[in-house]
Image (tube, rainbow, N blue to C red):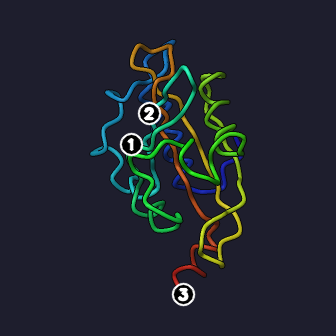
Amino acid sequence: MGLESHFLTELLAYWNKQAPPGSLPGRKDIDPLDIPQLLPYCELIDVEREPLDFIYRLLGTKIDHITRGKYTGLRVSEIPDQCAPSMIFDLYSQVVSSRKPVRAVLPYVGEKIKIKEVECLVLPLASNGQDVDMLLGGVALSDQEARLLAGL
């Protein structure tokens, strides 16, 4: 999959481990106590259908720190830089339709001028093992950008 971030590599390995044979993992299979070191980089996103939309249920502290606003509880369709058509809406839609993990490097659109792009991993979750009803996402900066942001 070509992941650069070790946080995202760990998240993908955890997701794979939690998947029941022949099925997608569901939210019930993801235990935050198993991955405390990854939580700051994770997001949970509800999938709505008819029309397709996404609701940010939870954003990790590292994600929250680099976004323009507080997205928890908002629909992607309510966020100007993310509503369709946008790269993020298309990314989430691709994961829902393919039922497979997708990795992307997206241009950063927030207020932190030292950040140029973010690496994203979006993983499908399905309460019935088949129909994607939630997304588990991970967002990470490059090591260099993370150091710049920290002022190192």
Badge 1 element: strand
Q: Alpha-carbon neighbours of circle 3 within 10 Å: few (<14), some, or many (≥20)? A: few
Q: CA distance from mark 3 to mark 1?
A: 30 Å
User: Which quadrant of the rendered structure holds the C terminus?
Assistant: bottom right
- What amino acid is labelled 3 in the image? Gly
**Residue plotted at (51% across, 54% down):** 7
Residue at 59% x, 75% y: name it.
112
Residue 102 disc label: none
Q: Are marks 3 and 2 in contact (CB under 8 Å)?
A: no
First in sequence, mark 3 or 2: give its number: 2
According to the picture, the residue beneath numbered tag 3 turns out to be 151
Q: Residue furthest left?
A: 33
Spot occupied by residue 51 in the image (x, y as percentages of width and height): 57, 24
Residue holding disc 1: 57
Position of residue 8 measured from the top left corner of the image (x, y, whole percent): 55, 50
C-alpha distance separating marks 3 and 2 = 34 Å
Q: Earlier in the sequence, mark 1 or mark 2?
A: 2
**Secondary element at tag 2:** strand
Q: Give the structural element (helix, strand or loop) at label 3.
A: loop
Question: Which residue bears the numbered disc 2?
Answer: 46
Instruction: Give the label, 3 or 2, closer to the camera.
Output: 2
If the image is split into quadrants, where does the N terminus sit?
Answer: top right
Q: Amino acid at mark 2?
A: Asp
